[in-house]
Every structure is written in structure tokens, then in C-alpha cells.
Image (tube, rainbow, N blue to C red):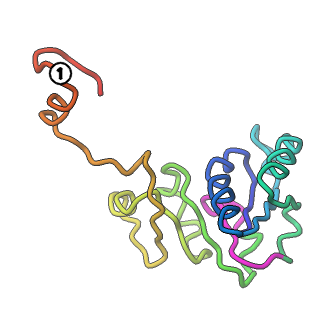
Amino acid sequence: MNFILSEMTFLRYFMPLIIEGNSRGVRSNMFVGRSGKYNCPGRNLSTLQQLSERHNFQLFDLSAITACHGPIILIEGVDIDTVRHMDNVKVSLTYMTDFIDSCKNYIDKIDYMVFPSEYFANHYGKISEKNLYLGSPKYDCKRQSREELLEKYNLSDDKYALV
């Protein structure tokens, strides 16, 4: 797997995939870009090197991505124009709810868009043949009624409770 890392915050999505890939014998490459933001990977190269050594992935400058093989995974289409001309499968992961406004800028340039759940795609009107649903315990929860919550947590109906 090939990941484009332009912001350190992308690691929260990439690292679980890298770790799982390792357990299945899938090698990963991280192509490091520069955002100029506070969370720019260029400001954190020693941390990236430590992660690379600990989790067995290769680090490259983003300019080297043209030689990679296999799928390219990015966040919200960031740096898609760098790889748009390449034949690799391009997969964009959604970042919280940024996709609501931003996916129109990259949906035609990628092969797949990964959502935390089908609910989000439906709710925000983003249904597409390109959609994949990864699932997320953070977002995949069944909403319970007031009565169910009162019973589940043995709460009194005459007091307020924040659940």
C-alpha cells in the first residue's frame, strides 16, 4: 500500500491500515509531502522515522511516488493532482466530515472513496458507485430511545442526565 502523508494527523487513519497490512504480509510505503501547516510531516521527520522503524514501512519524498506500484491511499483527495495521471488505483479516505464540501473537488479523480459508514454517505447525499464502507465504532452506533437509555443505565426519569 502507498500512502500520501501531507499532514501528521493523517497518521491516525494510516497507521491502523499499515499495522493490519503488516499482519497480512502487505508492505507499505509512506510518501511524505509538505503542507506548510503546523502539522507538516517535514517538521516531524524524526517521529516519522521512528514509526517507520517500529511498524516496518518505507519513507519516501512525495516526488518519488511516480515509481510506486499498487494502490495509492490519501485523505480527502489531498495531493490527488500529484498522482492523477498515474494508472494506480486511488483511494481517498474521508476525514471526519470534511467530505461534505470537499469531495466535489476530487471525486472524479479517484477510484474509491472510503466512508466510516453507509449512514454518513446516505445522510449527506454522497451515494456513489465509488463508495466503500470501512465501518467505525466511533460512528457506527445504534441510537437508543430515551426510554431505552433510562432502562439501560437505571436512570430516574425525574432528573437530567447527560449520555
Q: Is residue 71 magenta?
A: yes
Magenta stretch, overall SS: loop
What residue occupies the far bottom of the structure in this picture? 87
Q: Which of the 4 image quadrants contains residue 144?
A: top left
* Quadrant position of the C terminus in the picture: top left
Residue 43, position as x, y percentages in the image: 86, 40
Relative to residue 36, is residue 25 drawn left or right?
A: left
Residue at the spot 73% in from the left edge and 70% down from the top edge: 81
Residue 39, position as x, y percentages in the image: 75, 40
Q: Secondary structure at mark 1?
A: loop
Say how many tags the image has.
1
Nearest to the observer: residue 45 or residue 109: 45
Relative to 44, say whether 55 is above or below. below
Nearest to the observer: residue 109 or residue 96: 96
The amino acid beneath tag 1 is Leu
Q: Please provide the residue range marked out in magenta.
A: 68-80
Relative to 82, say whether 140 is above or below. above
Which residue, given by chain and number where applicable, does mark 1 sit on?
Answer: 155
Q: Which of the 4 image quadrants contains residue 62?
A: bottom right
Nearest to the observer: residue 121 or residue 133: 133
Q: Is residue 12 magenta?
A: no
Residue 77, position as x, y percentages in the image: 63, 63
Residue 112, position as x, y percentages in the image: 55, 73
Relative to residue 14, is residue 108 drawn left or right?
A: left
Residue at the spot 81% in from the left edge and 75% down from the top edge: 68
Give neighbour class at mark 1: few <14, some 14-19, many 20+ (Cα, 10 Å).
few
* Quadrant position of the N terminus in the picture: bottom right
Q: Which of the 4 image quadrants contains residue 105?
A: bottom right
Residue at the spot 16% in from the left edge and 34% down from the top edge: 146
